[in-house]
Amino acid sequence: IHFYFYFTGCVTCLDHDEHYILTFPNGYGRQVNSLIDIFIFNALSILTVPWIELGGECSISCSKTGYNASIVFHTKPFYGGKKHRVTAEIFSPNDKKPFCSIEGEWNGVMYAKYSTGENAVFIDTKKMPTIKKKVRKLEDQDDFESRCLWKDVTYNLKIRDIDAATAAKH
C-alpha cells in the first residue's frame, strides 16, 4: 500500500511571528515476509506484524527568516538496512551549503553534525514527553471538522461494528 501527501502544512511560532511551510513524506504499508513465503508459496505471511513506513523527500521553509531544510525519509531496502531512517540538511538564508546535517531514526535518536565540526544529539524522541491534544468539544466543531465528520465511523469502530463503520463513511 502506498499513499501520497499532496498538500502542505504551516506551523506558526507565535512568539517570533514566523510561519514555516512544510511538505510531507509518502507513506507505505509494509510487511516482513520470509523468503520461503515469497518464493515458494508466493504468499504473504499472516504471522508477521505490518508497519507504516515513511519515504521520500520533504522540506521546511520560512519566508521571514530565509532558513530552510531538506529532509529525506529513507525506505528500508529489501535486503538489510534499517527502518525509519531520516537524513536532513539545514540551510541559512542564501547559502548553498548546509550549516547542519542530521541523521538517525525519525522515531528514535537523531544526531546533528554542524559545519563547525561539532557533533551532538539533535533530538531523542523516546525521551520526549507525550502531550495530550487539545481538541474542541464535538458540539463546538463545524460539520466538516475531522472529529465531527468521522464521529460515527469512530464510534462504530470502537464497538467493533465494521459494517456500520463502513456505512458511516458514505
Image: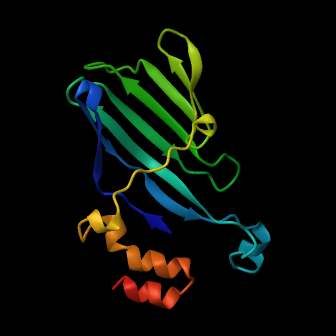
Report the number of discs: 0
| Residue at x 51%, y 28% (from the top left corner) | 102
**Residue sitting nearer the eye, 3 or 131:** 131
| Residue at x 37%, y 19% (from the top left corner) | 97
The quadrant of the picture occupied by the C terminus is bottom left
Q: Residue furthest top?
A: 116
Q: Is residue 98 above or below residue 148?
A: above
- Left of 9 or right of it: where is 63? left
Residue 64, by quadrant, is top left
Query: Could you tell me residue 5's position as x and y percent?
Result: 36, 57
The colour scheme applied to this rendered structure is rainbow
- Left of 86 or right of it: where is 138? left
- Left of 42 or right of it: where is 129? left
Q: Is residue 96 above or below residue 46?
A: above
Residue 16, by quadrant, is top left
| Residue at x 27%, y 31% (from the top left corner) | 14
Q: Is residue 153 above or below residue 10?
A: below
| Residue at x 24%, y 23% (from the top left corner) | 65
**Residue sitting nearer the eye, 7 or 88:** 7
Q: Residue furthest left?
A: 64
Residue 91, by quadrant, is top left
Query: Could you tell me residue 55's position as x and y percent?
Result: 49, 51
- Left of 37 or right of it: where is 12? left
Query: Could you tell me residue 63's position as x and y percent?
Result: 20, 30
Query: Could you tell me residue 71's position as x and y percent?
Result: 43, 38
**Residue sitting nearer the eye, 76 or 140:** 140
